[in-house]
Structure formats: structure tokens, C-alpha cells
Image (tube, coloured by chain):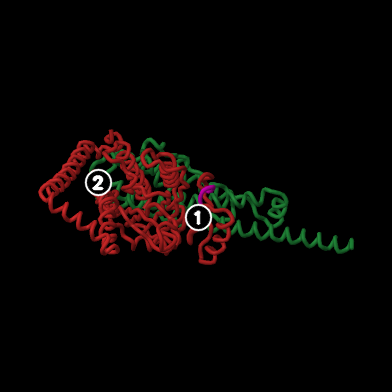
Chain colours: A red, B green
């Protein structure tokens, strides 16, 4: 039961069922309209098909384009669009129950901020999808999935696949704090660069955290105000969630990376979990309780991460 | 040849000792800087406590003993604020009194719950919020100080750091330990 995760999710299953029924009804309506159209214009369609085959020999290029275009629309675009609609139907109720607004398109400006801060790779281009906005204990909160592609062709692979989270803490006025994933020798070189930029390395008391991250800050006290023991614990939980708790999309032992940047009253977190978490292609055909639980858990966890900060600032 | 080896070894030794000396002095300065950071926050807290006491005294007739205790401790920390950062004994004493004050303020905050008028008083709410913010600043400053002190201890307890430290008069500084620092949170199931 999703209610066990959070009381706000009470009755969400029935809402999701209703949403799925609505979706199925819509799909059934579209299909029956298509069938009706086919039956009504059966003869015309047969004539058009025969003419098309004849044209294939007379104007082969144009005919190939028409048939190819139809096949692409029928077998690639339509199923994808259906999945996107399915996602919008099913993610929205969960988001609303948690007081978040969901949009399919993400805000690339926030991703640009993350890129300028050096917490995501530069790459060739960025694609931001599946955005959630809302408030956690009165603090503005933004979440979007982001893919940073390495080249003009998507098949060339991605440098970053994950989420960007932005929080605007009302009272905070932090000097710059940068938390990077520990990367051995590379980080040592980076350390020299950061010191040059006026940031110094911060050593924290948590051995586990120290093993995983390198922290740089302009002010040692600000860094500790941000990285409280509670907050560090929450970050570890977020990492554990994305590493071990993926029943639906079955990620193959992902290498989770969390990096963040804080300045002024803004905190940007880059979560690289090497997957499109909301990718419609990976979703099940029908409502999946485990999937809904996964989505809800993710937001509750990020909410708790934000709450642990709000206590402090 | 032997001469060159002896001179090289000697220079390496002197160079090594010099770098160790630099490291000790740098770490001591860092610890003192961290102490100065705490000092500022503790002074801010002492000022805020004065405001809290003024407001609380109007309402809390049955908590005279507690208010008296807080007043006395505050007076003590205010007078002890002259403690020199290089004197570990003074610093340790000061931390002990500050910790007592912190605990007494905790009791006072709990006692405030029994006075609904005081609890909802806007001045008191403002003072309590400001107090909470200063406590967060103190916690962060304390962690920085303890980290700097830990690094200093490592460099002056390991040979030949202990000898160099004795020669230049650098001694260990006390950690600022507090009961709330050991408070750990939650397990994952609380949030998942």
C-alpha cells in the first residue's frame, strides 16, 4: 500500500486505477474510431493501397517515402506517444498527492546552472524531461530528469543521465560549496584547481562520506552548515536508493554519482543514476504497483533530503 | 663522496623538520581561527540569551531557580570570554561552562512549553528562532574547530612533531564536545 509510505498517498491506488481506466478508454475510443473509419472507407482504402503499389513502380522514391513515413508513424511514433500519454496519466496523480506539479518538459536553464557550476559534464547537448515543481516545508523545489549527450548523434551515448534538483533556501546566504564525487588522482588535480579558485578542501568527520566525496568551500563553516551529519546521512540514503532499490526498470548495477553546488540561497544537486527513470519505453504496459511505489519513494526521499536542510537554514 | 651523502642527508633532515614545523604552525593557526569562529557565535548566543531572559522573566514566575541558573552561567561565560585562544585550560573551562549554559537553555526551552502565553509571544518566538539559528552556527563552527584540533593533534603527537611542538610551545587544544553532537538520526525505513 502506498499509504504506508506517506499518508498523503492515501487512496492513490484507486486514483491510479481510474487514471489507467481513463487511459484505456481513450485508447479504446481511438482504436474503435480507426476501425470504424477503416470499415466505412474499406473500398476507398483498398483502391488507395492498390494505387500506392502501382505508384511504387512508377514513382518509387515518392512511394517509398510515403510508405516509410506511414510505417515510422504507425510503429515508432504512435507507440512512443502512447507511452508518453500513459506516463502523464500515471505520474501526475502521484505528483499531485505529494503537492508537486508535473510537466513533461524540463527547464534547461537550471541544467545550465548545474553545468556552469561544474557538477555535470559539458557534453554536446542537453535534454531535460519530466519536471516536478513544488514546495517542501515552504521551500521552492524543482526536479527534472536530464540527459547530457556526448555528440550530435544520440547513439554516441550520454555523459550524464539522471536528475537535477534545485532548492531555494529562503534564509541561507552561503558562500560557495562544491561537493564532488571522489575520483582519486583526478580529484587531486581538481583540488589544486579549486584552491586556485579560492576554495579549499574541507575534511568532514564522517569517514564513509569522506571516502565517497571531495568537498571544497570558500568558508569552512558554511560547508559544515550545509553538510550536517543528518544531511550526509540522507545523501547516503539517496545513493543507496538508486543503487539497490530499482525493482521496475532493472538497472544493471549502476554507478550512482551525486554532486552538488551551493551558493547564496540556492542548492543544486546532480544525481547521475545512468538511466531515464521515467523513460516511457521502459515502463510496463499496465499499471504496476512496484513502479508507482518506486516513483513515490524517490520523491519522499528527496523531500526528506530537502527537509534536513530546511531545519538547518 | 661520504661528505656529499652526509650533507644531503643533513639537508633532507633539516628540510623535513622545517616542513613539519610549518605544518604545525599552520595547523595551530587554523585551530585558533576556528576557535575565533566559535567565539563569535558564542558571544552572539550570550547576547541573545539576555533577550530571552528579559522576556521569560515576565511570564515564568515558577521557574525562578532555572532563570537564576541561566543568568549566572551567562554572566560567567561573558566574563570568561577574555580567555586566550592559546591557553588550553581556559578554553576547556570555557567550553564546560558553555555546555552547561547550553543544557540550561534546553531546560528553559522545555519549560517555556508550560506557559502558553509566553510560547505564543511574538518577541519570544523571534528570540527562540534567532537562538535556534545561532545554535546551528555554533554546531557548524564547533565541527570546524574539532576538525582543526584533530589535525593539530595528529601533527604534534607523532614523532618528531611532539619534540618540535614542545620546542616552539605549541600544545594540544581541547575538543569542544557536546551532548547533542552524538545525536544520530534515523534509519532508512523512516523515510522510505
Q: Which residues are magenta?
A: A210-214
Q: Which quadrant would the N terminus of chain A be assigned to in this image?
A: top left
What residue is at 35 percent from the left and 53 percent from the top? Answer: A145
Element on which disc 2 rests: helix
Q: Position of residue B25 (x, y in %)?
A: 64, 59
Q: Which residue is mark 2?
A: A86
Chain ID, mark 1:
A
Based on the picture, tell me whether residue A217 belongs to the magenta stretch.
no
| Magenta portion: prevailing SS class | helix
User: What residue is shown with label 1?
Assistant: A215
Q: Along the horizontal axis of the image, is A288 left or right of B167?
A: left
Q: Position of residue A124 (x, y in %)?
A: 42, 64
* Mark 2 surroundings within 10 Å by alpha-carbon count, few (fewer than 14), some (14 through 19), many (20 or more): many
Locate residue A195 relative to residue A38 in the image: left or right.
right
Residue B86, compared with residue A234, is above or below; it is: below
Q: Are marks 2 and 1 in contact (CB under 8 Å)?
A: no
Q: Nearer the viewer, residue A223 or B36?
A: A223
Q: Which residue appears farthest toward the left when viewing the image?
A: A40
Q: Chain of mark 2?
A: A
Of the two numbered discs 2 and 1 on the same chain, state the one appearing first in sequence: 2
Q: Where, by quadrant of the figure, is residue A159 drawn?
A: bottom left
Residue A275's tag is none
Amino acid at each position: 500500500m502506498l499509504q504506508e509510505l506517506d499518508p498523503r498517498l492515501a487512496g492513490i491506488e484507486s486514483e491510479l486505477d481510474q487514471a489507467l481506466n481513463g487511459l484505456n478508454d481513450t485508447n479504446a475510443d481511438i482504436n474503435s474510431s480507426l476501425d470504424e473509419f477503416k470499415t466505412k472507407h474499406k473500398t476507398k482504402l483498398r483502391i488507395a493501397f492498390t494505387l500506392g503499389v502501382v505508384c511504387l513502380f512508377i514513382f518509387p522514391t515518392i512511394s517509398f517515402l510515403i510508405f516509410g513515413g506511414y510505417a515510422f508513424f504507425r510503429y515508432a511514433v504512435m507507440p512512443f506517444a502512447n507511452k508518453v500519454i500513459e506516463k502523464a496519466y500515471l505520474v501526475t496523480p502521484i505528483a499531485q498527492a505529494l503537492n508537486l506539479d508535473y510537466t513533461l518538459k524540463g527547464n534547461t536553464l537550471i541544467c545550465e546552472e548545474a553545468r556552469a557550476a561544474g557538477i555535470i559534464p559539458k557534453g554536446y547537448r542537453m535534454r531535460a524531461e519530466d519536471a516536478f515543481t513544488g514546495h517542501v516545508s515552504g521551500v521552492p523545489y524543482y526536479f527534472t530528469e536530464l540527459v547530457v549527450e556526448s555528440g550530435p548523434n544520440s547513439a554516441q551515448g550520454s555523459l550524464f543521465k539522471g536528475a537535477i534538483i534545485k532548492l531555494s533556501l529562503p534564509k541561507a546566504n552561503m558562500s560557495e560549496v562544491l561537493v564532488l564525487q571522489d575520483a582519486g588522482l583526478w580529484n587531486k588535480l581538481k583540488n589544486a584547481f579549486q584552491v586556485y579558485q579560492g576554495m579549499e578542501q574541507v575534511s568532514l568527520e564522517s569517514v564513509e562520506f569522506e571516502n565517497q566525496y571531495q568537498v571544497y568551500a570558500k568558508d569552512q563553516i558554511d560547508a559544515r552548515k550545509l553538510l550536517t551529519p543528518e544531511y550526509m546521512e540522507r545523501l547516503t540514503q539517496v545513493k543507496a536508493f538508486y543503487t539497490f532499490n530499482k525493482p521496475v526498470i532493472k538497472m544493471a548495477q549502476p554507478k550512482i554519482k551525486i554532486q552538488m553546488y551551493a551558493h547564496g540561497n540556492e542548492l543544486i544537486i546532480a544525481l547521475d543514476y545512468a538511466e531515464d527513470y521515467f523513460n516511457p519505453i521502459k515502463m510496463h504496459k499496465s499499471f504496476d504497483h512496484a513502479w508507482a511505489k518506486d516513483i513515490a519513494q524517490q520523491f519522499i526521499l528527496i523531500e526528506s533530503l530537502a527537509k534536513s536542510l530546511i531545519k538547518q537554514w | 663522496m661520504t661528505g656529499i651523502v652526509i650533507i644531503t642527508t643533513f639537508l633532507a633532515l633539516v628540510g623535513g623538520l622545517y616542513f613539519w614545523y610549518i605544518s604545525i604552525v599552520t595547523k595551530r593557526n587554523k585551530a585558533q581561527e576556528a576557535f575565533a569562529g566559535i567565539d563569535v557565535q558564542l558571544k552572539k548566543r550570550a547576547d541573545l540569551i539576555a533577550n530571552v531572559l528579559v522576556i521569560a522573566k515576565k511570564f515564568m514566575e515558577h521557574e525562578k531557580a532555572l532563570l537564576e541558573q541561566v543568568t549566572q552561567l551567562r554572566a560567567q561565560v561573558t566574563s570568561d570570554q577574555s580567555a586566550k585562544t592559546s591557553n588550553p585550560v581556559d578554553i576547556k573551562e570555557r567550553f564546560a561552562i558553555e555546555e552547561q549554559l547550553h543544557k540550561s537553555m534546553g531546560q528553559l526551552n522545555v519549560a517555556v512549553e508550560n506557559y502558553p502565553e509566553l510560547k505564543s509571544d511574538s518577541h519570544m518566538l523571534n528570540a527562540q528562532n534567532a537562538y535556534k539559528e545561532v545554535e546551528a552556527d555554533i554546531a557548524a563552527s564547533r565541527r570546524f574547530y574539532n576538525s582543526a584540533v584533530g589535525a593539530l593533534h595528529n601533527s604534534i603527537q607523532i614523532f618528531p612533531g611532539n619534540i618540535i611542538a614542545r620546542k616552539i610551545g605549541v600544545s594540544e587544544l581541547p575538543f569542544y564536545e557536546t551532548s547533542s553532537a552524538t545525536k544520530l538520526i534515523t534509519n532508512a525505513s523512516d523515510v522510505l
